[in-house]
Amino acid sequence: MAQEDIFKKLVAHSKEYGFVFQSSEIYDGLGAVYDYGQNGVELKNNIKKYWWDSMVLLHENVVGIDSAIFMHPTIWKASGHVDAFNDPLIDNKDSKKRYRADVLIEEQLAKYEEKIDKEISKAADRFGDAFNEKQFRETNPRVLANQEKIDILHERFTKALNDNDLIELKQIIIDEGIVCPISGSRNWTDVRQFNLMFSTEMGSTAEGASKIFLRPETAQGIFVNYLNVQKTGRMKIPFGIAQIGKAFRNEIVARQFIFRMREFEQMEMQFFVKPGSELDWFAKWKETRMKWHRALGFGDDNYRFHEHEKLAHYANAAVDIEYKFPFGFKEVEGIHSRTDFDLSQHQEYSGKKIQYFDPELNESYVPYVVETSIGVDRMFLQVLSASYCEEQLEKDSRVVLKIPPVLAPVKLAVMPLVKKDGLPEISRQIIDDLKFDFYCQYDEKDSIGKRYRRQDAIGTPFCVTVDHQTTQDNTVTIRYRDTMEQERVAISEIGKIIGKQVSLKDFLK
Ligand code: ATP
């Protein structure tokens, strides 16, 4: 099945099974804003816990905070967001559709890469075991021609971005013959800058109100609390501050479901280090974060690092972790070496000294910062994309979400074979005994087969069926989601069997 079709099915499945709903749906929705349903919120909470525990619980020198969304407006002046948090936008005059100029060019680069990949996979099929990919890449004329196109375009694109040259960005789009996917035309407007911050007013009277922004990242809430946390927590450098919270960006093009939203959630950690040591820490966090992703078992080849074409105004090194979504490799997390830019700016704009006295060096300095920043919603989409499977079985087929058990919304479903003979009561008792440890669901409606399918569709890793034999010997059938194997176990064993598989503690260890 084409990857786009899989993605469409995934979106429909998310709605049908209570993971993600369009915001304000009964009023025809609100663009690029989504609500999480009864299963979605559980998965989201589990993702957040996986992140929080691995960052805060397991690192003695990382602590958390929860700062307000509203902040003093000068913060966004100091951080550079008022002047520079822009995306270059371009409109197609025929379809009236709006695009990000940089994204159009990135997609063009991806097209050339796809062409190379196709040549390689064709050749790999043809030559079998004898295939030498390195040699093929270095000698095949079609691969070389496409690689040259990539290199030339990449260099031109990077220069245009770094020079903030909007005329050149448009020229690249024209020269590359990039067409609007809707109208198919090359009738483009000029490229313009567009600030992504939402603003609102605080204060009760029009005269007394002041314009404030909805934060476009959670990081600034950490920077402005650096001194508070360092002093009250008696933190010694190097140390980190972690935060999970909402962020808002008035994205120009909001497509691809929850990949690009106007209201989303971030999990960010700012790690404060001694000046000069930041690139070592950058390398360390890069590896640590990649391990965190790969530990979920979605396939190491589905991740890659992507170096930034253009460094943000505050960074001296930056890399993205990309995951292979059904619509291609895309950023899930950014790791940035932010230098002392943010703290120095806040020091200047606030007039307060924001420094660290290093007892070893016997001197004060403005710490450097390495940031890890991941979107909860993109991570959610990664988990769904990786887990969604359509399986052909002997007699029928099933859709199953093979979500890692630690993240699965519901861990256990308990099902009485029939709604009588005391079986519902035993089922309820099992749930009552286990519900403090993990999320259990009771289900007595329809045939057992249908009930299994329903649980497969939401990714429940374990189902327990209570039947008449249970009343005799206190055993039940436990059925495993991925293998669909069933075995007979004692009721007293259920907690242990499941507990081990869904325990974040065991997983993190
Ligand atoms: P992009 O290039 O895709 O716009 P970005 O580089 O601007 O992303 P960052 O500012 O580095 O993103 O934000 C850190 C993380 O926050 C991203 O890796 C992503 O997971 C998440 N994120 C950013 N923007 C959005 C959005 N509009 N919707 C959902 N998640 C987002």
Image: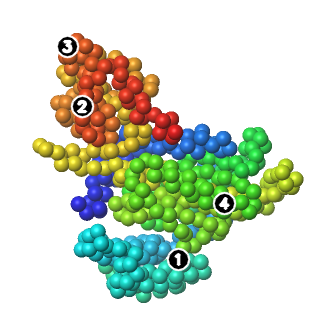
C-alpha span from label 3 to label 1: 71 Å
- Tell me whether the residue at label 4 lies in contact with that at label 1, contact meaning CB atoms closer than 8 angstroms: no
Spatial CA distance of label 4 from label 3 is 66 Å
Which mark is drawn over residue 280? 4
Disc with the residue nearer the chain's start (2 vs 4): 4
Which mark is nearer the camera, 4 or 1?
Answer: 4
User: Which numbered disc, 4 or 1, marks the residue that appears first in the sequence?
Assistant: 1
Q: From the viewer's perspective, is 335 left or right of 364?
A: left
Please rate how many residues cluster around mark 3, counting C-alpha atoms within 10 Å: few if below 14, some from 14 to 19, many from 20. few
Q: List x then y, in percent, for residue 490.
A: 31, 19
3D distance between C-alphas at marks 2 and 4: 49 Å
Which mark identifies residue 192?
A: 1
Residue at 29 percent across and 23 percent down: it is: 489
Q: Circle 3 sits on which residue?
A: 421
**Mark 4 vs 3: CB contact within 8 A:** no
Q: Position of residue 433 (x, y in %)?
A: 39, 19
Instruction: Describe residue 160's horizontal placement relative to residue 435 as left or right.
Output: right
Q: Which residue is mark 2?
A: 486
Depth check, front residue: 60 or 178: 60
Q: Are marks 2 and 4 in contact (CB under 8 Å)?
A: no
- Residue pictured at 78% horizontal, 58% vertical: 366
